Amino acid sequence: MSQEQPVDLQILNKVRHLIPESFKIERQKKWEVLKRKGLVQRILLKSSNRFKLEQTAKYDEFCDALDQATYGNNMDVIKQFENFKESIKPKIKAGFQFGTINGVESLDLNTFETKKGSFKTKQGSTDLIVFWSSENEKSTRSLNELNNWLSLNQNLKLQINPIAVSLDDDANNFKNHLKNNQLTQFQHYRYSLGWDSSNAFQRAMELNYLPKIAVVGKENEVIEVTRKAREVENIIKTYWEAGSESEDDGKYRELLDQQTFRFIKKALTQQIADLLSQNKSFAKSDFIRLSLTKCYKIAQDGSKEIVERSHLKVSYEVSVQSTQAIKLFLNNVTAVLGKDNVQVKRSIVKDPTGMLDMITSGFQDVLKKNYKVIQEYTIRSEYFNYVHDKEEFQPDVKVVSKKAIQNLTFKEYQTIYTQVLPIFKKYQQEIDDSDDDSDNDEEQEEDKRLIFDRVNELTDCLKSGLELSLGQPFQTIQNYHPFGKDQVVDIEHKDDQVLIVMYWDDNQQCNRQFTQILKVLLVNEEKFKDKVRLVALSKHKQEAYELFLLKNQGIEEVVEFYFPRDENQADQVQYNVKSFPHFIVVDKVGSIRIQSQVEDIESVITSYIEESIESLNQKGPLNDDEYSEITQFLYSDARKKLSQLSNKRQFSLSFIFKEIDQGEKVVRFAPIIEYTIREGKQKYLDAFLALLNKVVPLSNFQVNQTVQRTLNLLFPGKACKLCQNELNDQTQQYYSPFSDEFYCVKCAEVVDPKAAGYKKFRVQDNLIFFNAPLVDKSVLNDIDVYRVGNNQKVKRGDQYTQNHALDCNGCDGDVKGFRYIVLNCLPGKLTDLALVDFCQDCFNEIRTGGPRLEKIVKRTKIYGYNPSMLMLRVPFYMGYYDY
């Protein structure tokens, strides 16, 4: 009885007719032992030939048929054929005939004008073609490296035709990069469409991974394709020394006798694999691979012919510290198999620890030149956080040991950073450009992590010397220019004025903050005049925000906008800016009070402008007796005054004590009281603070408060604004808190399907719906102001969409048409997902008391929902909190 064919060969037989007969297909069986994986057995199908570029349609047809044939098989089989498709697809590699490159434009480096056309490699010359993009740092580095090499070897350049082809989507980025970098050794082209997945040549060249460097010979044949600039010189010289003869395609194949092969296989699987996996002498980043191969050629009729039985092949890349370990391991392997049966194919000894020492040494040399030294210090932060369920304060101590360069000025930081950056980049690039063996990825990542961690450690050390913390004096911010002007100005604090600095970028969170800020500044224009200054500092240069400023025309008349001269300026380090928005709030005497996001900008401004300079000047570090008195007070019965504030979302309170221990000197900061409280609940906290004031005056504390603002609504309206029909407490109705007008259901729900945007609606405001008669009238009071929103409108150029990117809490379906936000659920602190939303269908069920109402109430019970609750109707989607 004949043995059934393996599944992969059965599948191959179904599609073999779609592969040209000249293609030699091999089935390779591999036994591999990797240090981190142990023994792995793989079966590979490979082709000796590839489809040509002009056969791309046939290749696609083959892939479609193969996908159908493999459908339903296990993942191992599917992965096996995915790899086979890779081995047979059109790909530009050694031996490929390089033809004309179409769809490109050439650039004149003198005029920077472009001309559409194509280019061909030169017959009789050696072409060096670099595919790159200004947005890909690795490729710009390679192009620069090759440009420098050519400029230093002009005799060599006379024999080479250097061409650089950019895949930049944006022609301006392409031109600007060449204007700023003297890459004059190359002729420059750019693909007009940038990366184009429909371009057969780009796919075959795999130009979605950059850089790609092709060396093309005198007969227009590809000599080699590489991603490493450092290999180019050797590739070209090897080609010249060998003459124009191409490499022999047929590689030497070992064909051991069956008995020897079985002996090696048995020893590998039963003995040597354990020798490696159980060896504890190697470092985590050491890479070692042992492989054994048996290969058959598969004929058209499905018959097999053995073409390879290999010796055991060894590849390794180990650290200097593991040199003895690898030597001992190889001795043990050869003792088992015999020296003739082991071949070391690749042996690399690396020195990541040495690189770490060189990085640190280079950093120390720069500090020495600038007369700076690293000092160790400790930041001790002690928190007493109010815990609601226990009604007591819970201590928490955080101690952070850091290294920094003390008393570092802004200018000194910039000087030192400029000098150490090339050192950091050199070793980061060196480790980044290391071996590309995919089996070695994890080990390489371990080496990269070591290098990058050391760079980050030293960078943090440098930054720590510049960073300012709460309680320290504000320092002037430099190198920014105002909107519409080129001249750089200093941003300084003015005595008796609250300064708010908002670091921003064009994102949803910042856009939402700007809407709130505009509203607050306009409403309080007289109140805040000369008492508050708010400036917005952008993350990037002004040209990056042309679209934002176009959509928000006039915003610069209310908010002071400033833009940096350079990217990643040092002030972002100084003020610990890691995300956007990021607020710096400086009080009247110039002390930094907030360095974080701000939930309610109005309450922050109001609390700080009410502080007197006299009380601010009294704030200072505590002595030991005062500290003891405060901590004893926090554990006393006084905390019972806070028992009425039991809602975590509506109240939080922390006492913070911070000190910096510099060895010979300990710096203490003024104690901080930080709290968030709901409007109307302040009296309970005031009673607690009044008792504290008798122990230690509140003027000694830095108080950071956020008040959750609320509103109460009057109901019902008397008449509809539009039709004047009477409204009463029994009629369902809508209300605009932005115009303070009521509308009947009939007028508010008029929609013109032929109109576009807001013209669809007779009433264009976001409206609050009253589901009268109200069974629960408490829903009219204590409503979070932020839930009502800002009546935002879709900005010019943005899409009007009624497909809201969220799920309905009543049915889990998509929210389409109007969005209905419940105003009374989950009152309190703004969190990532603090809104309860309904779709149009669920809204209809609620307002009519439909059959699904009971189910909707049951689903939303965890949010405290009841059908009397008010709902805000929002027509278009601009973001979760953007309405």
Image (tube, rainbow, N blue to C red):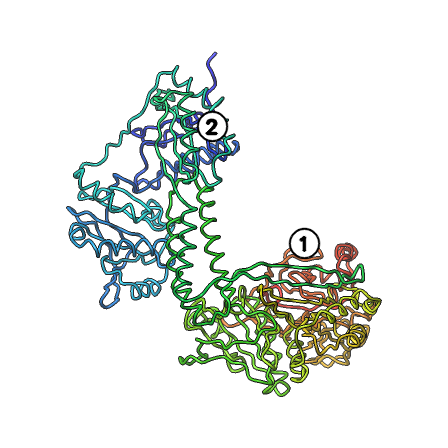
Tell me the number on the disc at residue 41.
2
Q: Is residue 323 above or below residue 481?
A: above
Q: Is 443 on the left or on the right of 768, as rendered?
A: left
Measured from the top left, where is residue 395 in percent x and y? 73, 60
Identified by mark 2, the residue type is Gln
Q: Is 176 on the left or on the right of 654, as rendered?
A: left
Mark 1 vs 2, N-terminal side: 2
Dot 2 falls on a residue whose secondary structure is strand
Q: Residue furthest top?
A: 1
Q: Is 54 on the left or on the right of 576, as rendered?
A: left
Q: Is residue 799 above or below residue 162?
A: below
Measured from the top left, where is residue 370 in percent x and y? 40, 67
At label 2, counting other C-alpha atoms closer than 10 Å, the crowd grade (few under 14, some 14-19, many 20 or more) is few
Is residue 748 in view? Answer: no
Give the residue pinned by disc 1.
812
Dot 1 falls on a residue whose secondary structure is loop
